[in-house]
Amino acid sequence: MSKYDFDLDLSTRNSLSLIVKRIKPNSKILEFGPAHGRLTKYLKEEMGCEVYTVELDKKAAKDAAKYSKEIIVGNIEDYEWFKKYKNLRFDYIIFADVLEHLYYPDKVLTQAKELLHKDGSVLISLPNIAHNAVIMDLLNDRFTYRETGLLDNTHIRFFTKKTIDKFIEKCGLKISYETGVYAAPQQTEFGYAYNDFDSSIVSHLYQHQFGEVYQFIIEAKRKVSEAEIVLEKKEMALLFYDTGKGFNSIEVLKTSYSPNVNKELVFSFETEMGDVKALRIDPLEFPFSIKIDKVLVNSIEIPYDQLVHNGFYMNNSEIVFGHSDPQISFLVPDDVVVNEVVFKYEYINDILDSKAILLKEKEQQLQQKEQQIQQLHEEMVALQEIAESMRIKNRLKKVFKFYKKATTS
């Protein structure tokens, strides 16, 4: 079985599902590299499109041919397809994970452009070689090719956001729409996690604008009046609510947001919740720094000193979470029926000094130990007082017994 033979998944955010959303039904399409025709089949049978294809692999081409109006089997860079289709004009030309496999992708794209209708589009997906997982690999002195993924062993050309922009422009096209497929390093084939690296490196990676873009999805045209760029990554924030069972994976609300853009999180319950005992906000899944403005349950503000978190204070008001499981929890006031929780904040995007963080963590650990020692000392003093009082009581008992015995004899 070919490594590119898999089912078409339109239920998740991936390169093909995003490309399909840009295509109008009943269009004429030229698809490069259809593999076994999973996208070709959908375009023909579900969208009524007429699809012409170009495929290198002979076995895969047999499957793709079932759904193709016409298919060219051969190397894209032999340009047999241009000779065959030169009198046709297409509404869309698709290069889904194809151009990175070519020696001269700019020449292919420039030639393919000639087969577009005047208002036609080229739809492209390209892997991001500047993904944070690749940078992590390089930091570990590795650049290992794999069967599939960002370092697919058949990739010849590599692209970043800036080189893609220049590449499209060089081919005489303009980007009309651009978005991305996102994946955190631990979700990729590399398997790294941010916690594997020093916090100063992690902070730099977090500020890397396109560091978690796994693939760029581009629609390009000859003429564009205004481009639509949708490359702001959305993070997932969670609100856990405890109704007496403790915090669990069932009693939870979710909302997506951009930490650098939004200044508040709003969680709204579909029905009023009268039995909520405590709430916990998990704002992000990586280390970060934050200043909390307000936490509101309905319109009731939760006092700052009642908030419990698993970070530590930096410069008094700033809370630093030096791990990937930040949590902020608090008790719900008695008799409050919860219908909305609002978390207002300021996201701190400065690079964190790892040494300062470590020193601060050790300082707080020492403070906690000192508090524990002080508490133990106070408990020992209390016990000594109790013991002393018990000794006095025992002495009094002995005196009383002696006195009673002396007076009755």
Image (cartoon, helix red, strand yellow):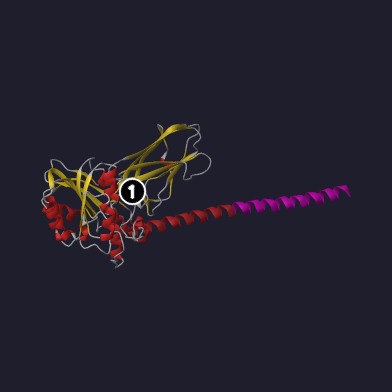
* Residue 175 seen in this snapshot: no
Task: Look at the magenta stretch and give its main secondary structure.
Answer: helix
Question: 221 or 360, which lies in front?
Answer: 221
Residue at the limit of the structure toward the bottom, as seen here: 141
Q: Position of residue 340 (x, y in %)?
A: 40, 34
Q: Position of residue 188 (x, y in %)?
A: 34, 57
Residue at (49% x, 32% y) in the render: 274
* Residue 196 occupies quadrant: bottom left
Question: 318 or 3, which lies in front?
Answer: 3
Q: Position of residue 77 (x, y in %)?
A: 16, 60
| Label 1 Cα neighbours within 10 Å, binned few <14 / some 14-19 / many ≥20 | few
Numbered range of the magenta stretch: 381-409
- Indicate yes or no whether the magenta region holds residue 388: yes
Q: Position of residue 369 (x, y in %)?
A: 48, 57
- Residue identifier under label 1: 9
> Is residue 118 placed above or below 385 in the rendered structure?
above
Question: 157 or 353, which lies in front?
Answer: 157
- Indicate yes or no whether the magenta region holds residue 321: no
> Is residue 261 placed above or below 376 in the rendered structure?
above
Mark 1 residue element: loop
